[in-house]
């Protein structure tokens, strides 16, 4: 997030993730980030009302429908889409530099094919 509480536009633009849901969990419940530590993804249970009202029963047993659009799976773990993006950046030299400072493109050096990565 930037200093105004908005999603980082660099992540949105360069990583291909939707800025509106950048910090929201794909599989979760409640609040600004779709995350509640009381009831985690894949579970059901009572969630206390933060204002002191009665608890609410929630069922989060269905998995996220569009995980390829999210960075966070359940509020604590990243999605496969995010890991795939980071791996592609690493293997194509975006984050890897040789001792002399040049980008080290392992995709070219090792003849890697990412066409099946989705």
Image (spheres, rainbow, N blue to C red):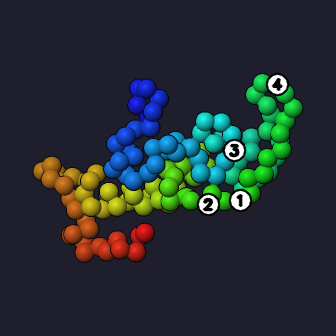
Q: Residue at x 15, y 53 (%)?
A: 102
Task: Give the SS element for disc 3.
Answer: loop
* Residue sticking out furthest to the left: 100
In the picture of the structure, the residue carrying the numbered disc 1 is 62
Q: Upstream in the sequence, badge 4 or badge 3? A: 3
- Please state, as top left, top right, bottom left or bottom right, where the N terminus lies in the image: top left
Q: Nearer the viewer, residue 103 or 31?
A: 31
- Please state, as top left, top right, bottom left or bottom right, where the C terminus lies in the image: bottom left
In the displayed structure image, the side of residue 29 where residue 78 appears, left or right: left
2 or 4: mark nearer the eye: 2
In the picture of the structure, the residue carrying the numbered disc 2 is 65
In the displayed structure image, the side of residue 44 where residue 100 appears, left or right: left
Q: CA distance from mark 1 to mark 4?
A: 28 Å
Q: Quadrant of residue 31?
A: top right
In the picture of the structure, the residue carrying the numbered disc 4 is 52
In the picture of the structure, the residue carrying the numbered disc 3 is 29
Task: Name above or below for residue 82 compared with residue 49.
Answer: below
Task: Give the SS element for disc 1.
Answer: loop
Residue 81 rendering spot, x and y as whole percentages: 47, 59
């Amino acid at each position: 997030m930037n200093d105004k509480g908005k999603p980082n536009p660099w992540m949105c633009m360069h990583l291909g993730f939707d800025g509106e849901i950048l910090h929201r969990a794909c599989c979760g419940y409640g609040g600004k980030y779709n995350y509640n530590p009381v009831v985690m993804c894949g579970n059901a249970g009572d969630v206390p009302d933060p204002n002191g009202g009665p608890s609410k029963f929630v069922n989060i047993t269905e998995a996220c429908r569009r995980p390829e659009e999210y960075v966070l799976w359940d509020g604590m773990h990243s999605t496969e889409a995010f890991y795939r993006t980071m791996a592609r950046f690493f293997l194509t030299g975006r984050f890897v530099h040789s001792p002399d400072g040049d980008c080290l493109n392992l995709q070219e050096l090792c003849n890697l094919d990412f066409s099946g990565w989705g």
